[in-house]
Image (cartoon, rainbow, N blue to C red):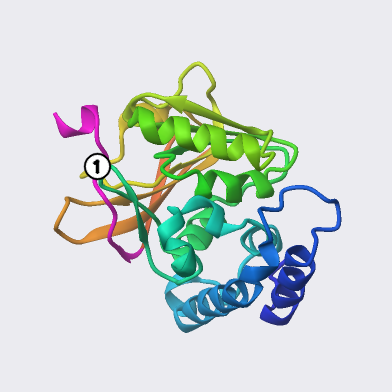
Amino acid sequence: MRMSLAIIVGLIMTVMSGNENGSRTGPDPTDYSGPHQAMMQAIHNDIARNWQVLGRENLSEPVALAMAKVPRHEFVPPALRRSAYANHPLPIGHGQTISQPTIVALMTDLMAVGADDTVLEVGTGSGYQAAVLSEVVTRGMVHTIEIVPELAETARRRLAALAYENVVVHTGDGYLGLPEEAPFAAIMVTAAAPEIPPPLLEQLAPGGRLVMPVGNHGATQWLTVVERNRDGKFDEEVVLPVRFVPLTGISED
């Protein structure tokens, strides 16, 4: 099901005015309801404008709900909270960024996961993308891996404080994935590499999808979706040009 903008805005008002189940609300979240609505409007406009390329005019219902619910201001440095809901990336330190909301929403939508799935995110960063995934795979698990120990620890504490109990933050080289937790119904890589890491393809379950930007740093990168067929073969689709920080670790060698 695809969700209209009017429904999304209504959900934001409900969530930001108290969150009916009384959980996962940051300090005084109503201060951010207006900017949050504006962010959702910007996402909707971006996707509608590019529907012929993206093959969709709206977000799926689970992704729209997640984007409307997760308090993005909790995942940016305090000095940048006024800009938390702007539809562009923001720096989070250590040369990393929190991705543009439209890209977060689109990559989550392209994963095509269900509530019971177990997924892997490579590149935890601030933890925002993991929180969005947590709201989609509500009965499943999100494993997320970050190579910068300081970012991993901060994200771990932040996600725990916000009660995202189905997220596990790992510290390590995401190029290698997490073979001990595989297979995954979907894998998202939030940094670019010249090619898709073979270990991640191996950890993708049959019928699963991997979403990541592919390309060299400073050159054109392409948001790419790889689906593993039931017979073990891979189908690849290029979606649109993007710009991401480079994947670090073994991929740099």
Q: Position of residue 171 (x, y in %)?
A: 41, 25
Q: Quarter of the image holding residue 130?
A: top right
**Most foreground residue, 131 or 214:** 131
- The N terminus, quarter of image: bottom right
Q: Which residue is mark 1?
A: 195
As shown in the figure, which amino acid type bears the numbered disc 1? Answer: Glu
Residue drawn at point x = 19 percent, y = 61 percent: 220
**Most foreground residue, 253 or 56:** 253
Q: Of helix, strand and loop, which one carries label 1?
A: loop
**Most foreground residue, 79 or 107:** 79
Residue drawn at point x = 62 percent, y = 77 percent: 34
Up the image or down, 162 lies above or below 166; here it is: below
Q: Is residue 183 left or right of residue 62?
A: left
Magenta residue check for 251: yes
Q: Position of residue 223 (x, y in %)?
A: 35, 57
Asked if residue 46 shows in the view, the reply is yes
Q: Which residues are magenta?
A: 240-253
Q: Residue furthest right?
A: 20
Q: Is residue 246 left or right of residue 98?
A: left
Q: Is residue 97 left or right of residue 26?
A: left
Q: Quarter of the image holding residue 2?
A: bottom right
Asked if residue 205 shows in the view, the reply is no
- The C terminus, quarter of image: top left
